[in-house]
Each structure stands twice: as C-alpha cells, then as structure tokens.
C-alpha cells in the first residue's frame, strides 16, 4: 500500500492572544492521497488559511500548534525543530502558493533570481544549474523560459501567477497548498490558471490543497471537499456528494447562496448573522446560533464527524 | 416602454499619459489611455442595468462619469431628459448629486474610519441641507439604518466602521447612498469584496430596496452570475466600448459576440463532475493596453474567428441583431 501524501490527525493550532486563545484550527483530521485535490472552503475567518500555514509547520505568531499530527509522505513534521523543517520539509515536501504572492515579488530583482534562491540554499546548486531548472518549470507552466531575465513589472497578472506556481513546484514537493490562487485575477485568466493546475495535477500526479471561499471555483478542480466553519471541518467528502447531497445545513446554505449562470433562481439564500468570534466560540455546535434547524442538543453538545455515506462525513446532530 | 431615466450618448473619457520633458521638447505627440471610447446606452426606470467586463475595460470609469466624479472628454449624459454634462454651477451639481448616488466596491475603504456611523450618515444630510434639527436628522438616520437592516440602530450609530463586519459596512454604505432618496444609484462591484453568504444577502437587500424606493441601478460587475440574478439588462464592455448589449438572460443564454462567449466559457460553475476536463476558452492572448487600441475591431487580435482584411481594418458598429439585442461584430451569425 502506498503512503498517503498527507495525513492530518486531530490538529490543533491556537493563536495565543492577550485576550485568550483563539481556536483557529480546532481538532482537524483528513487525509490526502497522491494525485488528489482537496478543496477547502469556508467564510473568511473560518481558519482555512491558518490551516494552510499550520500544515507548513509555520503558524503565524502568536499561533502555536498545540496538538495533533501532520504526516507528509509518512513523515511526522509536528515537533520537528525549525532548521530541519526549513531544510527538509518546506518547499521540498510541501510548498505553498501564498495568497497575493504575485504582488509580493521583489521589483528590483529579476524573476529568475527570485525563483532560484531556494535551489541555491537548499540544494547547493550553482547559479546556472538553478536557472536551468527554473526555466524548465517556467516552460511547464506555459511561459517563455526567457522570463527568468525579466523583472516582475514586465509581466501581466496571469504571468506572475504562473511564475509563483512554477516556484512552488521547483523543489518537486509532494503536496502543494494553494491559498486563493486566483482571487485577484480576471475571469478569463482565472480559468486559464485553473486549467493549468488541472494539467499539472495530471502530469505531475500532484497532491494539492486548494483554499478558497468560492465554491464555484472549488468545484472546477477538487476531488474532495472539506467545508470549514469556525475552526472545524463540518463536512468532508467526495465533491459530487458534497455538492449534490450536502449533509450539513451550513453547506446547504452556502450552496444555495451561489447565483447560477444558466439557471434562474428566484431568491438566493443567505445565512443570517456572522461567524462566531473564535476567542469564545458558542457552546455545543458552533453553527447553532445561525442554524435554522438548531435543537436543544445543538446548544449543549458538540457533534462529531459522522459517516453519512461512503467517505462522506458531516458533523451535525440532525443526521 | 417609458422614457429612459438615464441616457448615455457616445461617452468618451481619455486620460493623458505623462510625457517626459524631453519627449515634449522633441514634439512627440501626447498619448492617451482610452478608458471609455464611445459608449451609449439607455436605462429605464426601476430597472437594473449591468455593465460587465474585465478589469481595465472602462466600466468603473463609466460609472464615475455618470456620478460626475469625472468629467467626460466627449459625449453626453442625460438624466430625465436633461443634459448633465453642461452643469457648471455648484447648486446644479448639488441638485444632481442628490438624485444620483454611488456605492463603492470596498466598504473597508469607502467609510471614513474616524467617523462614527452616525456621522457617516449625517454628512450627506448636512451637505444637502436636509433635516433642520439634529433630532430630525437622527430620525432619518435611524430610518435609513432600519431600512438596510442594521438593527437596532441605537446600537450601531455610535460605533466606528472597524467595529462592524464587512456585510454591515456595505449596508451602511448603501444606507448612505439611499438616505438622500436618489433616483439613480451606481453600484460599483458592491458585493465582490464580500463572502458568498453575505453577497447573497446584500443583493437581496438591493433588490428589495429597488422595489420599495423605486431606485434604478447601474450595476457594475465582473461577475456574470450575479448580473444574471440581479440585472434586467446587460452590456459587456471590452477596451472602452460596449461590444454586446441586451436583456441579461438573453445575452447569457445566447451570446452574439465572441468576447462574450469567451467570458461566459470562463465563468466557474459549481459542477464538480467536470473537474478533470480542461476548459476550452475561445480566446487568445491578453488584453492589449488601452493606450494603443488595435485598429479595426479592437477585439480582433484576441478573436479566434477574426478575418484578415475585414476585422483588422474596419471598426464594426453596434447593431441590433435580435429584438433589443445588440452586438458590435462583423461576423455575428457567421461563426
């Protein structure tokens, strides 16, 4: 049996603020097979980006991993010292396409210079060798390899995003985390980038975690969907199941809130209220104050993820 | 159909580019960004007219021209039959702005962080001299907040914008636009910064207020799906021109222009069964700069159907191909 690309068990990451711990990632478990894409969705502030950073072993201060396990390629990374993480895990085993990274490129260095830094420091390559590698990956993402000599301002938004994707792939990681990789792009460029990621998934047998709040984009690429709410996964399952037979009221509401391009919708649904403050999440099910079906038990006890169908889980007392 | 409430005729806005001192000495010609380059449309009372396009197509500039945040280079704007491009006096401008208001995209940037919600909503009343006493204005402000469902208003009037959620902030921005009881509202991407669930809520609210207050909207967006849901009419812009215009559903279900087709093909849809299929996008290249507009049809360098000797030479005109459904393309029906 082959090992899973990524195994996450009971992962907890809290931000220790002066007002108390913020439970941004609270008891999260899932597995990711090789060549599989997991879509991670939820409203802003639900902890999806926090989870991304945590998987890289670098929660943003004052965040700390306080429990659970993350296995990349079978290797446990929780508890590894920082220098080992930096040398052997990040970019090597698991890399990330950061949100807005295309606008964070250094304007005074060439694209190539920015891309090859990890190759020189991690792999001890010399400059020519590293540049060659960078060019190979630029070609893979559909760019002219000569772009290594260009400066960021000479590239369009779509081209920059391709450079960022190539950079994330440079060290041939097992898992790539893509945090809102298409948010700042126009709709046609967005579709081109999604096409590129589909192609890379197939050609490189890449495992990906795709983070976005947009369920329409997520459907375009994900094999599996995890819906997060207030630091917890409330529903997890194969895409078709989650989209066509959503089990959790939150997922149902989220899907009913999307306007459709080719269908007439009389009234869009929306979820009244707002996500809870994670300093002080509501007792019981965290969704209960906004849930139209909330019962007494929902206010008292927290539901566990239950299997509602093959590989399809949801955490709700109604089930 | 009744008289249109707002008419735009051949509207143009060119922004001059900075020319270097030496370039000036050498007598190089001044160059312009052709942000809006000959746009015409009519909007009817209590209807929603969507202006759709990618960034840089000139849709926001058109909106800003209509609310007179910008002055047009050429062309006319008529509100209820009156030419508003010739407005010169402050009084006339004030009277116009009372009728035409705008909601901006980013509720985090459009509310003054040092104003309490009360002050945010009181400012337009003070500027337009509405409400003699503070008590009268307070009454109006409370009503406006109730209208946009920021309730109870007493709880929110003394808060600062940072103490509200994104959705609540956008509601306050809507209240600020509607407190003057305007005829016409330009909504510039009012929901694109918001979460999906809140997005639906704000669209529902704007729809409800349309019925209740009889406002007419120009809805500027890049999102075809929300345009279908919210708008009656739709115009697709590309590089400063309207390339297709018609009833929103008709444009989406039966697009005539190759650009509209490409845009529609690119829209993501929540249908996971197609996740392993590479999408076909009937378009090539990238948007050219609005400084050097391609000759002929400005879409021809990206069009997969473009014909040499026709599309790259002759500028097409916006023609009616079906009842009320216009397109600007030489090849409608021929591809």
Image (cartoon, grey):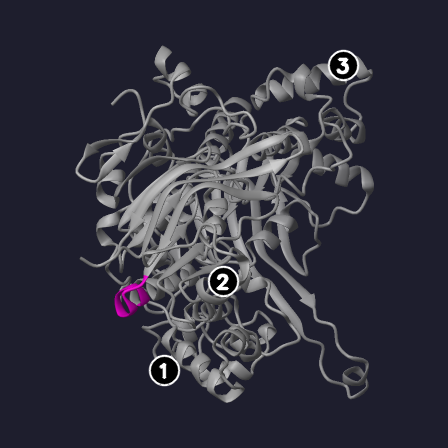
Residue A159 seen in this snapshot: yes
Assign a secondary structure to mark 1.
loop
Q: Nearer the viewer, residue A75 or A229?
A: A75
In this rendering, is residue A54 above or below A277? Answer: below
The residue under label 1 is: B308
Task: Name the residue tied to disc 2.
Answer: A84
In the picture, residue B225 is in which quadrant? top left
Q: Secondary structure at mark 2?
A: helix
Front in this rendered view, residue A57 or B298: A57
Residue A144 can be seen in this image = no
Give residue A315's quadrant in the image: top left
User: Which residue is denoted by mark 3 in the rendering?
Assistant: B136
Q: Nearer the viewer, mark 3 or mark 2?
A: 2
User: Residue at (49%, 76%) from the top-left corner?
Assistant: A119
B295 vs A264, left or right, is: right
At a point 57% along the width and 32% down the height, the residue shown is A21
Q: Where residue B293 sits in the image (x, y, percent)?
A: 54, 73
Q: Is residue A239 left or right of residue A228?
A: left
Q: Looking at the image, which is closer to me, B124 or B241?
A: B124
Q: Chain of mark 1?
A: B
**Does the magenta portion include A317?**
no
Residue A206 position in % (x across, y down): 31, 63
Question: In 3D space, how far apart are the residues under numbered discs 2 and 1 (Cα atoms)?
Answer: 60 Å
Q: Residue furthest top?
A: A296
Which residue range is magenta in the image? A200-206
Pointer 2 and pointer 1 on the same chain: no
């Amino acid at each position: 049996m082959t090992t899973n690309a990524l195994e996450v068990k009971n992962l907890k990451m809290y931000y220790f603020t002066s007002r108390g711990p913020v439970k941004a990632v609270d008891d999260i478990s899932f597995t990711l097979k090789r060549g599989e894409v997991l879509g991670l969705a939820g409203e802003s502030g639900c902890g999806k980006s926090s989870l991304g950073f945590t998987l890289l072993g670098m929660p943003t201060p004052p965040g700390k991993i306080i429990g659970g396990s993350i296995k990349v390629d079978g290797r446990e990374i929780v508890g590894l010292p920082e220098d080992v993480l930096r040398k052997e895990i990040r970019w090597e085993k698991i890399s990330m396409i950061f949100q807005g990274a295309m606008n964070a490129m250094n304007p005074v260095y060439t694209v190539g210079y920015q891309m090859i830094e990890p190759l020189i420091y991690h792999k001890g390559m010399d400059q020519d060798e590293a540049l060659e590698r960078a060019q190979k990956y630029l070609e893979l993402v559909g760019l002219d390899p000569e772009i290594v000599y260009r400066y960021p301002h000479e590239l369009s938004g779509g081209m920059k995003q391709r450079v960022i994707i190539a950079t994330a792939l440079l060290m041939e990681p097992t898992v790539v985390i893509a945090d809102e990789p298409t948010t700042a792009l126009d709709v046609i460029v967005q579709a081109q980038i999604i096409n590129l990621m589909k192609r890379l998934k197939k050609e490189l047998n890449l495992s990906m975690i795709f983070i976005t709040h947009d369920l329409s984009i997520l459907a375009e690429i994900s094999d599996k969907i995890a819906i997060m709410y207030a630091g917890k996964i409330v529903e997890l399952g194969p895409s078709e199941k989650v989209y066509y037979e959503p089990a959790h009221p939150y997922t149902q509401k989220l899907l009913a809130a999307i306007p459709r391009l080719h269908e007439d919708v009389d009234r869009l649904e929306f979820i009244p209220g707002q996500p809870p403050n994670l300093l002080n999440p509501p007792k019981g099910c965290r969704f209960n104050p906004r849930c139209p079906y909330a019962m007494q038990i929902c206010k008292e006890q927290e539901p566990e993820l239950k299997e509602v169908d093959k590989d399809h889980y949801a955490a709700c007392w109604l089930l | 159909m009744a008289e249109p409430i707002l008419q735009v005729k051949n509207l143009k806005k060119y922004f001059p580019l900075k020319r270097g001192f030496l370039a000036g000495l050498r007598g190089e010609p001044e160059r312009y960004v052709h942000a809006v380059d000959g746009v015409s449309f009519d909007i009817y009372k209590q209807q929603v007219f969507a202006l759709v396009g990618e960034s840089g197509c000139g849709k926001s500039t058109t909106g800003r021209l209509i609310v007179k945040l910008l002055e047009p280079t050429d062309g006319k704007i008529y509100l209820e039959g009156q030419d508003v491009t010739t407005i010169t006096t402050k009084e006339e401008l004030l009277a116009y702005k009372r009728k035409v208001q705008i909601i901006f995209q980013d509720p985090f940037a459009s509310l003054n962080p040092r104003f309490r919600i009360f002050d945010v909503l009181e400012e337009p009343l003070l500027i337009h001299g509405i409400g003699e006493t503070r008590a009268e204005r307070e009454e109006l402000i409370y009503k406006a907040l109730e209208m946009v469902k920021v309730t109870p208003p007493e709880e929110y009037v003394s808060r600062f914008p940072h103490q509200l959620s994104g959705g609540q902030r956008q509601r306050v921005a809507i209240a600020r636009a509607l407190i003057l009881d305007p005829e016409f509202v330009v909504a510039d991407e009012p929901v694109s910064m918001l979460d999906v669930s809140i997005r639906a809520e704000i669209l529902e609210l704007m729809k409800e207020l349309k019925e209740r207050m009889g406002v007419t909207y120009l809805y500027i967006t890049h999102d075809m799906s929300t345009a279908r849901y919210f708008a009656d009419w739709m115009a697709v812009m590309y590089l400063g021109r309207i390339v297709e215009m018609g009833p929103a559903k008709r444009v989406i279900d039966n697009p005539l222009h190759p650009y509209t087709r490409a845009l529609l093909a690119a829209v993501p849809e929540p249908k996971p069964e197609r996740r392993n299929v590479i999408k076909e996008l009937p378009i090539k290249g990238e948007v050219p700069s609005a400084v050097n507009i391609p000759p002929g049809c400005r879409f021809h360098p990206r069009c997969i159907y473009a014909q040499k000797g026709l599309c790259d030479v002759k500028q097409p005109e916006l023609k009616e191909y079906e009842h009320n459904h216009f397109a600007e393309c030489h090849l409608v029906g021929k591809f």
